[in-house]
Image: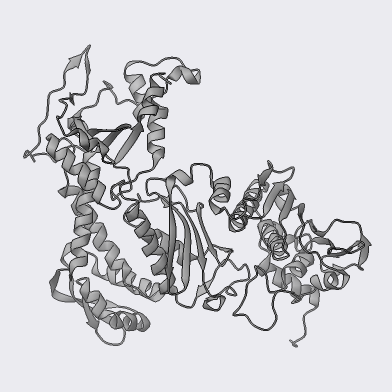
C-alpha cells in the first residue's frame, strides 16, 4: 500500500473528531470565539439538543471580508503569533470553525464597526461557498445546522436531546461564571430560556445567578497567594454539600477547566469533613503567569498542565483548609432552614392534620413498627453495651400504650454573660444526647456525640503532626512485587514514609521489603497500602495516601473516644463543650460530615408561633 496525502476535507473531519465531540463542544468553541472578540452580549439558540441548530450571536468586533474568508480555513487565527507560552485568549489553534464546517452546515455573517455592510461565508461538509455581502448588525452570527450530517456514524454516539441540551446549559453556565461582565442568553424550542444579565466585576453576584441565592450564605471567601500564583473564590461549608461534583468550578487565567489535579486538591482539602459519596461546592479562580501553565494539553482545552503542580495543589488545599479554620464552628444555615420548614403546619401544604406516630414519622422518616416512640436502648447511637461508667438508662413512661421519650429539663443556672458567645449558654440536655443552648437572639441545639467526636479527632490529628508516628516491627518482612519504576519512587521517598511509621527498602530490582508499619493501622493490608502509595506517588509525587489512612484511623478512634449518646452531662460539662467547639476549627460538622449543631433565630421561632 502506497503512502499518499489525505484530502483537506478528510483532514478536517479527523480534526473535528478531536475538537467537536458533541453539540456542547460547538457551543463552547463559538462562545469562546465571541468572548475573544470582545463581546458584551452573547445570545445562544439551540434546537433538538444542538443537533439541528446552534446559533451564536455576539456584539464583538466583527470581521471584514478578508478575515472572514480565512476564518474557515484550518490553522488560521488572530490570537497566536509564534509562541505557545504566552496564551492570553480562550482560543488559539484556528481549528474550531473549519472542524465544525467539515461535519455540519456552517454559516458565518460578520460586520466590523463602521463597515457599510456585513459579509457571509458558508461551508457544508467541508465544501466552501463563495463569500457574499449580507445584512447584519455589528458583530458576528454563526449558525451550525445538521451537526454530523457529513459523518452520520457520529450521530449514533450522541445522547438524547434532553441530555445534550443539559450539557449545553452546563457549558454556558461555566463560561458565564468566568465572565461576569458579559450578558448571556440561552434559548430555543428545546429548553426554557436562561438569561444571565451582566454583573460587572461582581463575581459573587454572577455565581449566585448560576448556583442560586443560597450560595453566599453557605460559602466562605478565599484570597491566597503563593509564589506569584493567586487563588480567589468561594468554597462551601462542609455541611452544605452535593451528591455530585457538578457544583465545582475552576478557572485558570479566566479559562474554564475541568482538570483532575484541581478537583483532586479540592477533594483532599475536604477529606476529613465530608461524608462518603458527598461533594463540596467550590468556585475557584487561579491566576498565574501564562508561561507557568500549558493549556495546549488536549484539543478541548479543558485540561491544563502546571509547571509546578505541587505548588498549585498545596495552595488550593492550604487555602481551603485555612478558610474552613477561619470560619470557626460555623455550620450551614440550610440545616436550620430545614428544621423550621419541618415545623410548618401540614395545613399550609393543603394536607390533612397528622397525629400520633404518623405525625412523628413526617419529621424523621417512617415510624418504627409497633409504637412510634423513640427508645434510647434501640438507638444506633446508644452507649456500648456493658459500658456503664457515666451512663444510665431511664425507663420510659407509658402514655396511652405508647412509649414516650424522656427529657432532662432541669435548667442550668449559668452565667447570663455566656449568652454572648456564638454557641450561647447551655440550658438543658434532652434525650441524653442533645444540648440546648440559649443565645442573645435564638437557640442552638448541639449533638453532643458528634461535636465531641470532632474535638477528639482534631486532638488526634495534632498529635500526628507533633512527631514521627509510632510503628510496629513485622516479625517477618513482607515482600511486595512491583514494577521497577514504582520501586524506584518508593525508595526515593523512604525517609518521608518512615515519618509516617512505614519503613521499607529495596529488595532486588522489582520488589520492596516492608519491615515496619504504622501501629495505628493495626493488622492492615500492607501490600495494598504500598501499591496505593506507589500509584499516588507516580501521579502526584506525594505520600498523602498514608496520611489519609492514618486520619481515617484517627476518625474511628475519635468516634469511640468521644462522649457517647446517652451520657448525662452537668451544666459545666455542657458549657465547656460549647466553648471548646468555638475554639476548634471545623467543629460545625463531625468528621463524617454531619452537622454538629443547628441554630434557630428568635425571629424564626416567633414565625413558628405566628407572632410575626
Residue 52: percent from left, percent from top: 77, 52
The residue located at (75%, 88%) in the rendering is 2
Q: Quadrant of residue 512?
A: bottom left
588 sits to left or right of 341: left
Q: Could you say which is closer to the camera, residue 502 or residue 527?
A: 502
Q: Could you say which is closer to the camera, residue 356 or residue 432?
A: 432
- In the picture, the quarter occupied by the C terminus is top left
Q: Could you say which is closer to the camera, residue 509 or residue 87?
A: 87
* Residue 434 in view of the camera: no
The residue located at (76%, 76%) in the rendering is 76
- In the picture, the quarter occupied by the N terminus is bottom right
165 vs 363: above or below: below
533 sits to left or right of 495: right
606 vs 193: above or below: above
423 vs 479: above or below: above
Q: Quadrant of residue 225?
A: bottom left
The residue located at (11%, 30%) in the rendering is 393
Residue 424: percent from left, percent from top: 25, 37
496 vs 111: above or below: below
Residue 532: percent from left, percent from top: 33, 69
Amino acid at each position: 500500500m502506497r503512502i499518499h496525502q489525505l484530502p483537506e476535507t478528510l483532514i478536517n473531519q479527523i480534526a473535528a473528531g478531536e475538537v467537536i465531540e458533541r453539540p456542547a463542544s460547538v457551543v463552547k468553541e463559538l462562545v469562546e470565539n465571541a468572548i475573544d472578540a470582545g463581546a458584551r452580549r452573547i445570545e445562544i439558540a439551540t434546537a433538538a439538543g444542538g443537533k439541528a441548530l446552534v446559533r451564536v450571536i455576539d456584539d464583538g468586533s466583527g470581521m471584514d471580508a478578508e478575515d472572514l474568508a480565512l476564518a474557515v480555513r484550518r490553522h488560521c487565527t488572530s490570537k497566536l503569533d509564534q509562541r505557545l507560552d504566552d496564551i492570553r485568549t480562550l482560543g488559539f489553534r484556528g481549528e474550531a470553525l473549519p472542524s465544525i464546517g467539515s461535519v455540519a452546515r456552517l454559516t458565518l455573517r460578520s460586520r466590523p464597526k463602521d463597515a457599510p455592510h456585513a459579509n457571509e461565508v458558508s461551508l457544508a461538509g467541508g465544501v466552501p461557498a463563495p463569500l457574499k455581502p449580507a445584512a447584519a448588525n455589528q458583530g458576528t452570527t454563526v449558525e451550525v445546522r445538521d451537526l454530523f450530517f457529513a459523518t452520520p456514524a457520529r450521530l449514533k454516539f450522541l445522547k438524547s436531546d434532553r441530555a445534550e441540551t443539559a450539557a449545553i446549559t452546563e457549558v454556558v453556565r461555566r463560561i458565564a461564571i468566568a465572565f461576569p461582565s458579559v450578558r448571556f442568553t440561552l434559548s430555543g424550542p428545546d429548553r426554557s430560556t436562561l438569561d444571565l444579565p451582566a454583573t460587572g466585576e461582581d463575581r459573587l453576584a454572577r455565581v449566585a445567578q448560576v448556583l442560586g441565592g443560597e450560595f453566599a450564605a453557605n460559602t466562605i471567601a478565599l484570597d491566597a497567594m503563593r509564589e506569584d500564583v493567586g487563588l480567589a473564590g468561594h468554597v462551601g461549608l462542609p455541611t452544605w454539600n452535593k451528591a455530585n461534583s457538578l457544583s465545582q468550578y475552576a478557572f485558570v487565567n479566566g479559562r474554564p477547566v475541568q482538570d483532575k489535579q484541581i478537583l483532586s486538591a479540592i477533594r483532599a482539602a475536604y477529606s476529613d469533613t465530608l461524608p462518603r459519596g458527598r461533594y463540596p461546592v467550590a468556585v475557584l479562580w487561579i491566576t498565574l503567569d501564562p508561561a507557568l501553565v500549558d493549556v495546549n494539553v488536549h484539543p478541548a482545552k479543558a485540561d491544563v498542565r502546571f509547571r509546578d503542580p505541587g505548588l498549585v495543589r498545596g495552595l488550593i488545599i492550604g487555602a481551603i483548609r485555612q478558610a474552613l479554620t477561619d470560619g470557626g464552628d460555623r455550620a450551614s444555615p440550610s440545616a436550620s432552614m430545614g428544621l423550621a420548614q419541618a415545623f410548618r403546619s401540614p395545613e399550609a401544604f393543603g394536607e390533612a392534620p397528622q397525629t400520633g406516630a404518623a405525625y412523628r414519622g413526617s419529621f424523621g422518616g417512617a415510624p418504627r413498627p409497633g409504637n412510634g416512640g423513640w427508645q434510647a436502648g434501640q438507638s444506633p447511637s446508644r452507649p456500648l453495651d456493658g459500658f456503664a461508667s457515666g451512663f444510665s438508662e431511664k425507663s420510659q413512661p407509658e402514655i396511652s400504650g405508647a412509649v414516650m421519650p424522656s427529657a432532662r429539663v432541669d435548667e442550668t443556672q449559668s452565667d447570663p454573660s455566656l449568652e454572648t458567645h456564638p454557641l450561647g449558654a447551655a440550658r438543658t440536655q434532652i434525650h441524653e444526647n442533645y444540648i440546648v443552648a440559649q443565645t442573645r437572639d435564638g437557640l442552638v441545639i448541639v449533638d453532643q456525640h458528634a461535636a465531641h467526636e470532632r474535638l477528639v479527632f482534631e486532638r488526634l490529628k495534632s498529635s500526628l503532626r507533633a512527631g514521627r508516628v509510632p510503628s510496629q516491627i513485622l516479625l517477618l518482612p513482607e515482600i511486595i512485587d512491583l514494577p521497577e519504576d514504582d520501586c524506584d519512587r518508593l525508595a526515593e521517598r523512604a525517609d518521608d514514609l518512615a515519618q509516617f511509621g512505614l519503613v521499607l527498602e529495596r529488595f532486588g530490582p522489582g520488589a520492596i521489603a516492608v519491615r515496619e508499619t504504622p501501629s495505628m493501622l493495626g493488622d492492615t493490608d500492607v501490600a495494598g497500602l504500598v501499591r496505593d502509595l506507589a500509584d499516588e506517588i507516580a501521579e502526584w509525587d506525594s505520600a498523602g495516601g498514608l496520611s489519609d489512612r492514618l486520619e481515617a484511623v484517627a476518625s474511628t478512634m475519635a468516634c469511640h473516644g468521644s462522649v457517647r449518646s446517652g451520657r448525662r452531662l452537668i451544666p459545666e460539662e455542657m458549657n465547656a463543650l460549647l466553648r471548646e467547639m468555638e475554639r476548634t476549627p471545623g467543629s460545625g460538622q463531625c468528621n463524617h460530615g454531619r452537622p454538629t449543631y443547628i441554630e434557630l433565630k428568635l425571629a424564626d421561632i416567633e414565625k413558628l408561633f405566628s407572632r410575626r
